[in-house]
Image (cartoon, helix red, strand yellow):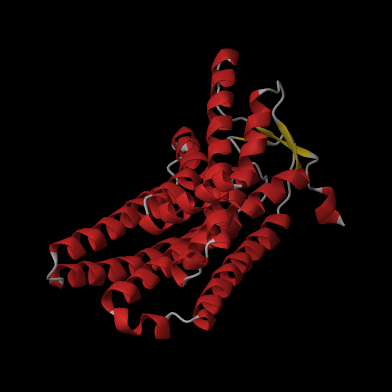
Amino acid sequence: MEGNQSWPPEFILVGFHLRTEIEVLLFCIFLTLYISNLLANGIILGLIWLDTRLHTPMYYFLAHLAVIDVCYASGNLPNILENFVKHKKTISFFSCVTQMILFLTFAAVECMILVVMSYDRYVAICHPLQYTVIMNWRVCTVLAVASWTCAISLTLTHLILFLKLPYCGLQEVNHIFCEILAVLKSSCGDTRINQMFVFASGTFVIVGPLSLMLVSYIRILWAILKIQSGEGQRKAFSTCSSHFCVVGLYFGIAMMVYCIPDSGHQAEQQKILSLFYTLLNPLLNPLIYSLRNAQVKAALCKVLQQQRTI
């Protein structure tokens, strides 16, 4: 009971110090990007559901990624948009904790799904004749469930450690949403264990998967160089290079935020970097992973033709 009484009723999100007209402009830009994210990922999910040709392991994991991206942006962006049109940028303790849980869960599970997708591409390119045997539906289901289970377990540990902290005085969070490192700085208790676990879990879900992906892509690149057909090399390299660009951006920024010790002068920089996860990354994934894919384009054309004939 004593721990419950130390929780604040609300937090104040400092956000960016901007003029009113700039906030209105950002509201319009962010809202446009959010709607685009919902539409792009919604189209991907719809096409994968409707077209049986896309009922393969690759698109099974793409469907997971699309769900993650929609939930990722929806966990933070509505509150950010609301704060642009409010004079007092407050958020209740319960809403803040919920926002933090969603962010941590979907950030971790996206790392896991990305490494699973790189493994899928490795098997498809390096062991094409054994692909259907290795990547059967049982294996795909186990990999997906393991990714979600691992992410949720890490988040619950973060939550348990966070709820033990006391808070006193005015609770200002120097961020655009309830990001865990920013919220921890507003506690008047000892947060060393929390920060250590953030660093450890960040290393586990970022450095570990990134290392595995680098191994997969190096093996893929080596296999591509052995392909005799120039067209085959071009097609394989085009697919994997676009995937690697997304992975590089996502994990590179994540390492800057969670794997590099805080120097105390990175608050504004981390706010801007966090916008990448909330706004740009959920929109880049469907564009690079799916909408550039010939099979997805064919499925989209098929659906549009069916609509015209109705």
Residue in the picture at 36% in, 49% down: 249
Q: In the visual, does 254 lie left or right of 121? A: right
Residue 291 position (above or below residue 144): above
Labels in figure, total: 0
Q: Is residue 223 above or below residue 176?
A: below
The extreme right residue here reads 1
- Tell me the quarter of the image containing the N terminus: bottom right
Residue 46 located left or right of residue 90: left
| Percent position of residue 270, x then y | 47, 39
Q: Residue at x 32, y 56 (%)?
A: 244
In the image, taking residue 281 as reference, residue 75 lies left or right, namely right
Residue 81 spot, x, y in % from top left? 64, 31
Q: Residue furthest front?
A: 309
Quarter of the image for residue 214 reads bottom left
Report the front residue among 29 and 252: 29
* Nearer-the-camera pick, 102 or 225: 225
At horizontal 56% and vertical 56% (from top left) the residue drawn is 45
Judged left or right of residue 16, residue 163 is right
- Residue 249 visible in the shown view: yes
Q: Dividing the picture into quarters, in which one does residue 121 lie? A: bottom left
Residue 181 visible to an observer of this rendering: no
Residue 95 x, y percent position in the rendering: 74, 44
Q: Position of residue 255 (x, y in %)?
A: 40, 53
The structure residue drawn at horizontal position 63% and vertical position 25%, both measured from the top left corner, is 84
Q: Looking at the picture, tell me which residue is in the foreground, 193 or 203.
A: 203
Q: Which sits in the foreground, 120 or 156?
A: 120
